[in-house]
Amino acid sequence: MKQQAPPISGVPGVTSKKKNRKIIQNWQLYLFILPTVLYFIIFKYIPMYGIQIAFKDYVPSLGFGGSEWVGFDHFIRFFDSYYFWDLIKNTLGISIYELVVGFPLPIILALLLNEIKDSAYKRTVQTVTYAPHFISVVVIAGMIIAFLSPTTGILNSFIELLGFEPIPFMTDPKWFKTVYVFSGVWQSTGWGTIIYLSALSGVDPQQHEAAIIDGATRLQRIFYINIPTIIPTMTILLIMNLGNIMAMGFEKILLLQNPLNKSASNVIATFVYEAGLLDAQYSFAAAIGLFNAVINAALLITVNHIAKKTSETSLW
Amino acid sequence: MDLNKINETKADKVFMGFVYVALTFALLVVLYPLIYIISASISDPSAVNSGEMWLWPKDITFEGYRIILQNEAIWRGYMMTIFYTVFGTFINLVFTLPTAYALSRKDFYGRRFFTFMFVLTMFIDGGLIPTYLVVRNLGLIDTVWAMVLPNAVALWNIIITRVFFQSTIPRGLEEAATIDGASNFKLFVKIIIPLSAPIIAVMALFYGVGHWNSYFNALIYLADRSLYPLQLVLREILVLQEMSSNSVSMTGGMAEFIHSQQQLAAIIKYGVMIVSTLPIIIVYPFLQKYFVKGVMIGSIKE
């Protein structure tokens, strides 16, 4: 995030008297911000204070502070568990698959959309491809389950029509990641183009005119003018995606998960939900959540550092 | 003069052909499932199940919708969702607008401190379990407050709104108002709010759609079925019902409802997808315009 120009109060020479006058004059602005400050304290900072239960045996009656310390016991139990590597493998597997397939597609679609002039056709493509973004995750999961049903789903009707056996997409673990990733592509590719289209609208038309006069083809102009223009946007989004690699759309996974595909769909986030909220192992689940968050933060910092060194574009 | 047209080479023509083919392919891939849902919801169930109906409705029937509209759980869910959306969005605006305005004022001492306090939570976060425990310790479980307070404000929306205030409210307005003896509160209510209709619309839509579509908070904070929003009722019809033959136990009457309608189950499912998304479909033309604007504002600044 880019730093803003420092506010006047940061400029040396502004006396504290002036500062006090400013505070008094604008006292109502503090009332404006008070509810939000309270919100952040109660729903963000107190839970942050509550992370300590990852190192304790949380007993509700004793509260966050009063429960007994147990050190790294919960972490050790998690690392030694038989499902630890499965969770890591599924979490990373789904995220990387999603990144590899889902990251380039909005870029490609945006570059293609950018080639055609504003017209009813272009607006139709945009309106239709943006629409799935607004469908709720529950409806998306319902669509996936209905379309992919081996007996009544339309996709399997087509597969049978082509002379193949119906595929049990939702109950065969080896299909889970593909179903998750491609339903995400269907839902978000169109919407993902907006940010690139806005970057592409910043290309100086004179550059294109000069290139056309020099005899450059459209494809050459895409590669030498358009793509370089959106590289900073791509870098920022890539950093954010990589920094989130352990935190994918877990609400959708939770809906698509069933006992038969669980060997592929059990990820850290759904496991935290299950252990913490269904089994009430609060401290254990908080420890796993913390482990996940720490890996995420480390990844974000590392990737940002690499981006800064190699491309001059970075989040901070 | 269109240089593109004049200098169009053969390679360019082939390439443009490819562009149109690819875009049309994308269009059809996204459009097909949407059309299918609409058609399936009004077709004869056996034609839907057998795959005989694959594009346009077959043997049109509104039986599915009739049963949906008679179902009490769906109605109640609908009412609760409307309530959560309206009330939740109202709370969101009451939190977001004044905060963003205060942060947009250059003469607001402490704006950097508050911004830092808010932004920090994007990087460090208590996580699911501690947040849940805080909500529970506050006694919010199984109350409507659990549906609005834990998401009372979203940082990203504060940032977008602040950018709007900074870039559209003329500078000097504050000084002029102060000289005239108007308080900040008066200034905000009488002048800033009337100037901010576009951003208020964007924010109401952002937050409103979020409330309408969310299910997870309801899942973890509500056990009382009478408080269930539509999305949780949908989850029982669309997701759990499919798995009820496995280990997920069905709670309440939704399973019985679906089982009793075995014959119509298929088209009921497609029908509830439409019914639950209808309000979004109606506001979609506005959504698209304003949401795109919102994404743009967000991308310019950060």
Image (spheres, coloured by chain):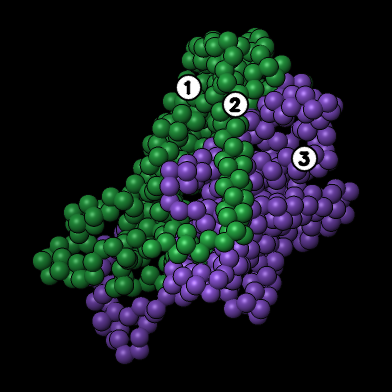
Chain colours: A purple, B green
What is the distance, in whole Å, between disc 2 and disc 3 at their CAs?
Answer: 23 Å
**Residue A145, picture quadrant:** top right
Specify the label residue A176 is tagged with.
3
A166 is higher (above) or lower (below) than A244? above
Mark 1 or mark 2: which is in front? 2
Residue under pointer 1? B76
Q: Position of residue A221 (x, y in %)?
A: 56, 67
Query: Which residue is at 10% across, 66% downward?
Result: B180
Q: Are marks 1 and 3 on the same chain?
A: no
Q: Are marks 1 and 2 on the same chain?
A: yes
Specify the label residue A275 is tagged with.
none
Quarter of the picture containing the N terminus of chain B is: bottom left
Report the side of B252 relative to A292 (left or right): left
Q: Is residue A226 visible?
A: yes
Q: Position of residue A205 (x, y in %)?
A: 44, 68
Dots 1, 2 in contact, CB < 8 A: no
Disc 1: host chain: B
What is the distance, in whole Å, between disc 1 and disc 3 at their CAs?
Answer: 34 Å
Residue under pointer 2? B36
